[in-house]
Amino acid sequence: MVWTTHEVINQTPELGDYNLYSTDPVLKEWVAKSAGQYDATLFHYGERLGRRAGFALAHDADRHPPRLETHDPRGNRVDRIHFHPAWHRFMRMAFLQGMHSGPWAAPAKGAHVARAVAYLMHGQVEAGSLCPTTMTYAAVPILAREPWFDSIAPLLYSTRYDERDLPLPEKTCMMVGMGLTEKQGGSDLRSNLTQAEPVAEGGCGERYRLRGHKWFLSSPSSDAHLVLARSPAGLSCFYVPRWLEDGGRNAVMVMRLKDKLGNRSNASAEVEFQDASGVLVGEEGRGLSILLEMASYTRLDCVLGSAALLRQALVRAMRHARHRVAFGQTLIGQPLMQSVLMDLCLESEAATLLALRLAQACDGADDPLEQAYRRILTPAAKFWVCKRGVEAIAECMEVLGGNGYMEEGPLARLYREAPVNSIWEGSGNVMCLDVLRAIRREPESAALFFGDLEAACAQDDPLRSRLQALRVLLGASRIDLEAAARHVAEEIVLLVQAGLMRRHSPETLAEAFVQSRFSGSGRVYGLVSGPNALNSMFERAWGGDS
């Protein structure tokens, strides 16, 4: 017998197809100002990403993580990693969009901004596939300086994603990963113990034998990795291919795949180098500086990734609040919920503007001011946006209540995904100390950066006052300043975000951001109340449907 005990009512209907680009005014407006020639391409990508079927595939990729096959049926060591078909679909989309190398393959005004916009949309749907995309993107400018780069450039620039595990001559494209972290060191890369011995005389472009391990190897199925190892002259960077020129496998043994909280569609591995073959990249002994340059791009993508997760969580929360009725009224019509949602709208817009400003700095790579923004603001933004993203996504989950906590919906996956951007590519403390290091070691860049910040704050008394207090703090003793490094990074980001909101957002939003972020009222969302909770703000944040 089939019993009907109740009628299902007051549940938010499933989100249908929508365009992630056309429903996001922040993205559209920034592209119009700095990368207008990419508008049609980004519109198409937003439409393709926003299909309901794509969100379902992202759920499948998360539920079916990669699997390691160490040996084939005949007992040969193969170390193959098998992914769910949904993973390869998202990788093909990312490569077709040029997110892995487009700005390097076809430099143009706004190319990095356009890539960032695509990244912000892709990360809302499936974030795991962004890791190998990011690593390849960040590796290209490092490898481009090598005399042998032309031999791999066509594969790095190719948009024809190729998941096959084959030697490079047989593939249509390639990916590059990174290997830095070891068991004993974590973020303390100077404690790395992996050894690299020259096969002959050694030197740039020469072959070395690597022996040791990596506790975390990103994108282990990539065709090559940039690896930090200790050579006779000190820590150096090596290009370690997956396959050797003779068609044999390199001696990089995958010991196991990591069982992660989030980012489950993507593989991360522990590996051992058993006299693996590697080619020295750059000068011997300069590996840290080379790989930190690569990290400046991967850290940017951490900011983009967190802003993307926050944006999608906000979309889900806004939509639920419009459909769900509680105590005789829709959630979005209730004053306290309006205060919470308003705060989340401000957080999302400010995070997105900050991420796009950093991408714009990549487009102006030769400009000293843009270099200063990249060097000082990138680690500060990674610290702040990634931390705030975790809190904001949790708040969005709470808007949905118990339904938001269930793995059947996307909020749980977004929440599990969020902490990784704070942890990978340098933890929060490492980022904040890096901000201080950049200010201390590059005083001319710091002067340019703070001069620009001062100009942005000149007409705003609260901002000018906070900037002056920050300048005083930066004059403290080294020990006191390091103890306050998180506060320094927070103040830098909030001042930059306030300036960006003043220039690019509606006046109501900018004023609400300044009042809420500089009032000292605390970090819990929804503490600021008043007339700022306007319907126009909600419509701007998410006008995808009713």
Image (spheres, helix red, strand yellow):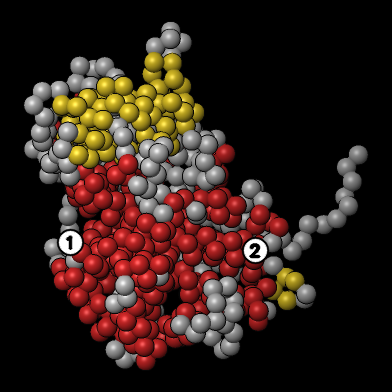
Quick check: can you spot residue 296? yes
Residue 309 location (% of width, % of height): 48, 57
Residue 254 location (% of width, % of height): 40, 26
Disc 2 is placed on an element classified as helix
Please give the label number shown on residue 285: none
Inspect the image, locate mark 1, and give the three-letter code of the amino acid beneath it: Ala
Kindly indicate the quadrant of the structure image that contains residue 304.
Answer: bottom left
Q: Quadrant of the C terminus?
A: bottom right
The answer to whether residue 450 is left or right of residue 308 is left
Q: Which residue is rendered at x = 43% and y = 14% of the image?
A: 72
44 or 231: nearer the viewer: 231
Q: Which residue is mark 2?
A: 398
Structural crowding at the residue carrying mark 2, measured as other residues with C-alpha within 10 Å and reported as few (<14), some (14–19) or many (≥20): some
Residue 147 location (% of width, % of height): 8, 38
Q: Which residue is mark 1?
A: 365
Residue 261 location (% of width, % of height): 54, 44
Q: Which residue is rendered at x = 40% and y = 88% of the image?
A: 462
Q: Which residue is rendered at x = 33% and y = 57% of the image?
A: 300
Kindly indicate the quadrant of the structure image that contains residue 7.
Answer: bottom right
Above or below residue 345? Residue 386 is above
Spatial separation of the CA atoms under disc 1 and disc 2 = 41 Å
